[in-house]
Amino acid sequence: MCSSILAGRGSDSDDYGDIAFWVGKEGGAGGKEGILNALGLLGMVERGKIVSIPHEDGPLPAALAQIPPPELMSSDGISELSDLLSRLHDTFEFRVELPGSEGTVVHFLVGKAEDDGYCGLAGVGVWAGE
């Protein structure tokens, strides 16, 4: 499969995985910049650029939309991840492209949990030739 579920198969690196984060109610209130600020990563925007990623209906990240469903759901880990992510609502995805970093891109999937706090996944991908 791939090391980062957010970066998907397009990433040229297997060195990075995804991590979960929780920023609470206030952390997500400011949208993308609010998430980055709550994670202490707002400085990335000064050097890079935020790009929205169209998010399909459903709990899984957009990068997985290109994988055929039988292959995708054959993994217990993906099924479990799908179940967990389906508990989020108002989900959105974005990435921060870092110039001069040899194609390093930081991906985010964010949503509201049942108690209205924001949480999600962050992962790093490397795009050769970017």
Image: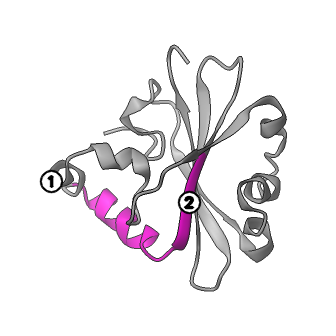
Quarter placement of the C terminus: top right
Question: How packed is label 1: few (under 14 Cα within 10 Å), some, or many (20 or more)?
Answer: few
Query: In the rendered view, does 3 fall on the left or right side of 45?
Result: left
Does residue 23 belong to the magenta stretch? no
Q: What residue type is labelled 1?
A: Pro
Q: In this view, does 17 lie to the left or right of 116?
A: left
Q: In this view, does 123 lie above or below 48?
A: below
Q: Magenta segment, which residues?
A: 75-94
Q: Where is residue 77 in the image (x, y as percent from the top left)?
A: 32, 58
In the rendered view of the protein, which quadrant contains the N terminus?
top left
Which residue is located at x 55 percent, y 53 percent?
93
Task: List the residue tagged with mark 1.
Answer: 70
Q: Answer above or below: position of 85 versus 41.
A: below
Determine the residue positioned at 35% across, 48% down: 64
For the residues labelled 1 and 2, the Cα–Cα distance comes to 25 Å
Q: Does the magenta stretch include residue 83?
A: yes
Front disc: 1 or 2: 2
Determine crowd level at label 2: few under 14, some 14-19, many 20+ residues with C-alpha closer than 10 A.
Answer: many
Q: Residue furthest top?
A: 129
Height in image: 99 above or below 55?
Answer: above
Q: How many labels sit on residues?
A: 2
Residue at (84%, 35%) from the top-left corner?
46
Work out whether mark 1 precedes mark 2 in sequence or the reverse, and give the earlier one. Answer: 1
* Residue in the image at 55% along x and 71% along y: 90
Q: Considering the numbered disc 1 on the image, is that residue within a helix, a strand or a loop?
A: helix
Q: What element carries label 2?
A: strand
Side (left or right) of 69 relative to 92: left
Residue 73 picture quarter: bottom left
For disc 2, the marked residue is 92
Q: Name the amino acid, label 2.
A: Phe
